[in-house]
Image (cartoon, coloured by chain):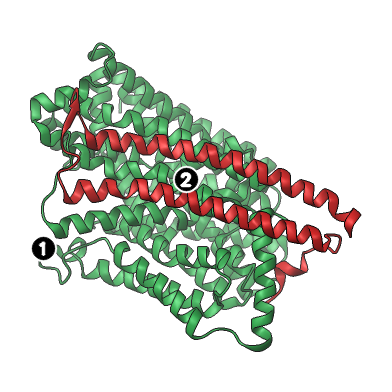
Chain colours: A red, B green
């Protein structure tokens, strides 16, 4: 093992800024895990229900079954989550910039 | 091939060669060759990601699968936006912040020993080469059918062009060929979609309704056979969703942008392209079944791989047929180029530059090694493709996804996110993932037919949990101790910060 990453760390980041950055990193993980869980919980019932039950077999309208509607909804949910995540990540980016901006004053 | 086809085909090939010429003049350094200098915009890279991922199997195969198999064919497409959302959430930004040229760079940011880098380089070469051969053979068979030329000639033409693009133009040429391919493919898909809608008075459900009334409910509802077959298909879906996150040729695309924000934008753009593309495919698939006829599609190719081409001829005559065939050809070249870049990067940067030369290789030396590796990769692909014309290539593609999901993904995620991960746990998990995937496929029906020892072919549902379990157990039971443990913790903290905030 080495400290390849650690060696790249500049000295100008203050202890306070480091704490803020750690918090931001934890927030980013939290958001990513929550959104990933939502997507997986929405997606995996599709193959499970489709491959092992007849729950999605019913025709709803014009030749469209529940299976097709559920499958098309995957795209909508993925796009919605991607958009929401991008907005959240941009807010975290702003927090990082702010933490780094204040760092030299505190350090 | 008639005169119209020849002209369209020649024009497209000349465009790609023009891109390669410009890229070759601009490509000066190893970074230019491996990751296009990291200077693509997020949107450009998003289009390139779509071009990198959507293979001829997607463009032609999924449409044919829906035309012949109904809803079940869509399992091969519906996972794509899900996989790329997970990529956006879990790996895109850390990859950009930690990686330089390859996936192994990410692991090496935490575990710098040569064993970890070698392991990831080896799985990268295995996954990408296996996928490369599957694409090569499939592509050559497709080109043979599309253009009515000899298989050997098809392999040599495809191999020759792929070599020129990657050897001279590197990742810059590859990226722009993928971008152009995405645009052409979307234009083709929209054209077919609108022409089919026109047949149904612009009712998007017309083709579904027609399928229901002419074939019955089995054409529009999921179909099931045995529980074991269901398990096999579920395992395939799991392997596809999670395999994307470990596919080296897809993941290194996130290294071609300047920062994490652009990496996010890349993934989001790609998801929009996938949504636009795959949401049109069911209408085109059902449209092909109705307008060409299931029997006609199956007669031309048993898996329906030429359904799109037959539909194009039915709707737009020889001109549309020629355009679709030429775009399918560029699609093949774009995907193959991406795969060659992944293999050559792992060989030149990881195995030569970092393992053999212990990080002391000059940029010029690494670039020369990359070009040699590109040449060798293309040559190996051509030779194996020539020998494998009559082999079952479906298992090769599933092996690539399964190894990517089972070996690469746990190693990547646990290295980035888990404090207690160790180098030996990375290596153990990758070895178990690789060996288990390979064993299951070799013992399954894809290789041995109905008399196989195992009743299923897709290993991901077994090999991924096993790889994850072994990684976690090894990390917990054989942790680093003493100074190594202290160093490991501080390295992890710095890596986590850099991966998630970009601050080092």
Q: Is residue A30 left or right of residue B161?
A: right
- Could you say which quadrant of the image residue B415 lies in? bottom right
Q: Secondary structure at mark 1?
A: helix
Q: In which quadrant will I find the C terminus of chain B?
A: bottom right
- Pointer 1: residues within 10 angstroms few (<14), some, or many (20+)? few
Q: Is residue B296 above or below residue B353?
A: above
Percent position of residue B120, x then y: 51, 68
Q: Which residue is mark 1?
A: B450
Chain at tag 1: B
Q: Is residue B97 above or below residue B448?
A: above
- The nearer-to-camera label among 2 and 1 is 2
Along the viewing direction, whichever of B282 and B367 lies nearer the viewer? B282
Residue at 23%, 38% in the rendered image: A67
Q: Is residue B240 left or right of residue B21?
A: left
Percent position of residue B135, x then y: 36, 50
Residue at 16%, 42% in the rendered image: B302
Chain at tag 2: B
Say if mark 2 contacts mark 1, CB within 8 Å: no
Let me know if residue B149 appears in the view. Answer: no
Q: Which residue is mark 2?
A: B85
Percent position of residue B389, x then y: 26, 54
Residue sitting at the far top:
B201
Q: Is residue B310 left or right of residue B427?
A: left
Residue at 57%, 56% in the rendered image: A29
Along the viewing direction, whichever of B418 and B107 lies nearer the viewer? B418
- Could you say which quadrant of the image residue B467 lies in? bottom left
Q: Secondary structure at mark 2?
A: helix
Percent position of residue B336, x then y: 44, 48
- Pointer 2: residues within 10 angstroms few (<14), some, or many (20+)? many
């Amino acid at each position: 093992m080495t400290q390849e990453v650690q060696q790249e760390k500049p000295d100008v980041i203050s202890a306070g800024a480091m704490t803020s950055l750690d918090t931001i990193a934890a927030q980013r993980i939290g958001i990513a895990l929550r959104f990933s869980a939502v997507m997986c919980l929405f997606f995996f019932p599709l193959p499970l229900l489709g491959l092992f039950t007849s729950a999605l077999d019913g025709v709803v309208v014009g030749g469209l079954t529940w299976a097709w509607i559920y499958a098309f909804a995957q795209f909508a949910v993925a796009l919605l989550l991607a958009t929401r995540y991008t907005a959240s990540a941009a807010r975290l980016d702003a927090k990082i910039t702010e933490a780094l901006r204040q760092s030299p004053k505190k350090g | 091939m008639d005169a119209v086809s020849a002209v369209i085909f020649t024009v497209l090939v000349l465009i790609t060669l023009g891109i390669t010429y410009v890229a070759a003049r601009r490509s000066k350094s190893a970074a230019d060759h491996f990751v296009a200098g990291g200077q693509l915009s997020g949107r450009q890279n998003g289009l390139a990601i779509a071009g990198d991922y959507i293979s001829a199997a997607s463009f032609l195969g999924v449409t044919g699968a829906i035309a012949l198999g109904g809803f079940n064919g869509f399992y091969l497409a519906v996972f794509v936006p899900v996989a790329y959302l997970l990529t956006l959430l879990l790996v895109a930004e850390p990859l950009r912040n930690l990686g330089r040229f390859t996936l192994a760079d990410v692991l090496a940011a935490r575990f710098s020993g040569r064993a970890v880098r070698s392991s990831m380089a080896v799985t990268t070469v295995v996954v990408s080469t296996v996928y490369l051969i599957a694409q090569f053979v499939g592509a050559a068979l497709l080109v043979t059918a599309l253009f009515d030329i000899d298989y050997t000639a098809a392999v040599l033409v495809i191999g020759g062009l792929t070599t020129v693009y990657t050897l001279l133009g590197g990742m810059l040429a590859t990226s722009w060929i993928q971008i152009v391919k995405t645009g052409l493919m979307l234009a083709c898909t929209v054209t077919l979609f609108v022409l089919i809608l026109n047949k149904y008075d612009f009712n998007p459900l017309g083709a579904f309704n027609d399928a229901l009334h002419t074939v019955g409910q089995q054409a529009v509802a999921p179909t099931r056979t045995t529980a074991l077959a269901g398990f096999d298909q579920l395992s395939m879906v799991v392997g596809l969703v999670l395999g994307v996150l470990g596919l080296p040729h897809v993941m290194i695309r996130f290294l071609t942008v300047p920062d994490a924000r652009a990496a996010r934008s890349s993934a989001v753009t790609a998801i929009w392209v996938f949504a636009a593309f795959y949401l049109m495919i069911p209408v085109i698939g059902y449209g092909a079944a109705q307008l060409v006829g299931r029997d006609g599609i199956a007669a031309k190719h048993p898996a329906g791989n030429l359904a799109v081409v037959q539909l194009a001829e039915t709707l737009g005559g020889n001109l549309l047929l020629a355009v679709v065939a030429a775009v399918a050809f560029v699609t093949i070249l774009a995907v193959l180029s991406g795969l060659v870049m992944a293999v050559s990067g792992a060989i030149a940067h990881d195995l030569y530059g970092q393992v053999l030369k212990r990080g002391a290789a000059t940029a010029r030396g690494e670039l020369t090694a990359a070009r040699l590796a590109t040449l060798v990769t293309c040559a190996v692909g051509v030779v194996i493709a020539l020998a494998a014309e009559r082999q079952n290539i479906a298992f090769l593609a599933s092996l690539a996804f399964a190894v990517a999901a089972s070996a690469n993904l746990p190693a990547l995620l646990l290295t980035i996110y888990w404090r207690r991960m160790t180098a030996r746990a990375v290596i153990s998990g990758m070895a178990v993932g690789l060996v288990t995937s390979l064993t299951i496929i070799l013992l399954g029906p894809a290789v041995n037919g109905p008399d196989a020892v195992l009743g299923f072919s897709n290993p991901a549902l077994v090999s991924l949990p096993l790889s994850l379990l072994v990684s976690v157990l090894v990390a917990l039971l054989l942790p680093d101790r003493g100074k190594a443990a202290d160093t490991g913790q501080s390295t992890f903290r710095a890596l986590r910060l850099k991966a998630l905030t970009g601050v080092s």
